[in-house]
Image: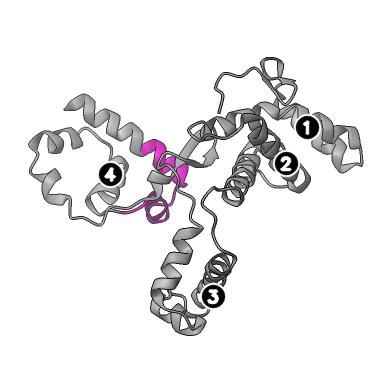
Amino acid sequence: MIKNKVEICGVNTAKLKVLSEAEKEALFARLDSGDKSAREALILGNLRLVLSVIQRFANRNENIDDLFQIGCVGLMKAIDNFDTSLNVRFSTYAVPMIIGEIRRYLRDNNMIRVSRSMRDLAYKTLQLREQLLSEKQREPKVEELAVLLEVTPEEITRALEAITEPVSLYEPIYHENGDALYIMDQLGDSRDTVDMWVENLAVKEAMAHLSEREKKVLTLRFFNGRTQMEVSRDIGISQAQVSRMEKAALLRLRKYM
């Protein structure tokens, strides 16, 4: 990808318009009333959002013009399907749509081609997994899926690996009030880290300067290996609040250590 390219697909990215939230709301209201020109205005006013998304794929040897066009397709789908009655910012809804469209393009145009039979097996496995998960309220084992699909567990594993797109732990998956939640925030730690923390006197002394809620968040996250989503359910706040509280508490710990 050519970095810092100003003109992409004939568009001068240095002069892209940025719509305010009020302008977006007004345009969506016009679009809902049947004003076709509002859709074009929404597209043009959100091209900078597409530009910011494709920068995440800068480490790939892909043509930036192609990625921009595919990202615009995702943007248009987001505009056409956005529900204005929900209390969600358009950018929060659109970014995953744009990323998904680009990933589909990269997957379908990957130099390492996945056979049709292997791709079909992977999708059948995913569908069956969702069905069993709904019926039995537990995660089905690979062996169960293999028996029902009349294949070996190894074939299922290879098929699922073949369609998996590697992602960064720092890939943002959700935004709330401007705070990004990353994949790494969803990961729990099953290791027993209590001893490592308790034995460190400096950490214990620093913990004394935190509020009770901050202590609880850090205890659940790092002593018990819980994910942010699990912590949010335990203490009754949103995951975004857990993320902010965790980061603030860690900064204070570093200060007192």
Q: Which tag, 3 or 4, sits closer to the chain's start?
A: 3
The location of residue 116, given as percent across then percent down, is: 59, 65
Q: Amino acid at mark 1?
A: Leu
Residue holding disc 3: 128
Residue 228, compared with residue 171, is above or below; it is below
Mark 2 Cα-neighbour bin, 10 Å: few <14, some 14–19, many ≥20: some
Secondary structure, mark 2, is helix
Span colored in magenta: 226-245
Q: State whether residue 215 appears in this view.
A: yes
Image check: 86 left or right of 53?
right
Where is residue 206 drawn, in percent x and y? 17, 33
Helix, strand or loop for the magenta stretch, by majority:
helix
Please name the residue that numbered disc 2 is placed on.
73
* CB-based contact (under 8 Å), mark 2 and mark 4: no
Residue, x 15% and y 50% (percent of image)? Answer: 194
Report helix, strand or loop for mark 4: helix
Q: CA distance from mark 3 to mark 4?
A: 37 Å
Please, what secondary structure does the residue beneath circle 1 have?
Answer: helix
The amino acid pointed to by label 3 is: Leu
**Residue where numbered disc 4 is placed:** 218
Q: Quadrant of residue 140?
A: bottom left
At label 4, counting other C-alpha atoms closer than 10 Å, the crowd grade (few under 14, some 14-19, many 20 or more) is many
